[in-house]
Amino acid sequence: MPSSLRSFTLKVIAANSTHTAENTLRVGNNDNGAFRLASGLTAAPNPFSGTTLISYTLANDARIVAEIYSADRRQMAVLANGAFRAGRYEHRVDASRWTNGTYTMELTITEGNNPPRRESLTLVVSR
């Protein structure tokens, strides 16, 4: 693998006749050249009707903001906002009072002095 390759983003889109969901995974190399997971933002189940479990992994200590927005950019939930240690995190989201539709989970990660990076995940509420 070329040493100039520092990171890449993998976008996965899954769709059927009624729903589309996407997940973005950012991967970067550490000081010894080995690639590490910067975060793996997932929701299971998705689509869902009541609750879903959002999970991601921080490879390093970071400041994060995790929010969910409706299609019209109304903030539906703030799951996290602050400094977090490296590790795996999970947030249960209760959307039982939300209307059917598509929502966006946005995860903003700031590691040290690096510029913030934003990852997003499409959530589908379907009853």
Image (cartoon, grey):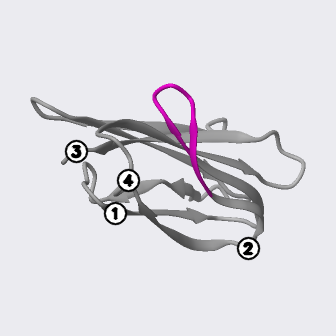
Residue for badge 2: 85
| Crowd tier of the residue under label 2, counting other residues whose Cα lies within 10 Å: few below 14, some 14–19, many 20 or above | few
Q: Secondary structure at mark 3?
A: loop
Q: Between disc 1 and disc 3, whose residue precedes?
A: 1
Mark with earlier residue (3, 4) = 4
Residue 43 position in % (x across, y down): 37, 57
In the figure, 41 relative to 53: above or below?
Answer: above
Q: Nearer the viewer, residue 48 or 20?
A: 48
In whole angstroms, how far apart are the C-alphas of marks 1 and 4?
10 Å
Label 3, label 4: how many angstroms apart (C-alpha)?
A: 12 Å
Picture quadrant where residue 83 is located = bottom right
Residue at 47 percent of width and 53 percent of height: 41
**Which circle marks residue 81 in the picture?**
none
Residue tagged 3: 126
Bounds of the magenta segment: 68-78
Q: Can you say whether 39 is above or below 106 in the image?
A: below
Toward the left, the furthest residue is: 17
Residue under label 4, please give it: 97
What's the residue at 28%, 39% (across, down)?
A: 100
Looking at the rendered image, the disc whose residue lies closer to the viewer, 1 or 4, is: 4
- Farthest residue to the top: give it: 72
The disc, 3 or 2, on the residue closer to the chain's N-terminal end is 2
| Image position of 69 (left or right of 103) | right
Alpha carbon separation for disc pair 4 and 2: 32 Å
At 51% from the left and 40% from the top, the residue drawn is 120
Q: Earlier in the sequence, mark 4 or mark 2?
A: 2
Which is more N-terminal, label 4 or label 1?
Answer: 1
- Quick one: 105 or 3, which is closer to the camera? 105
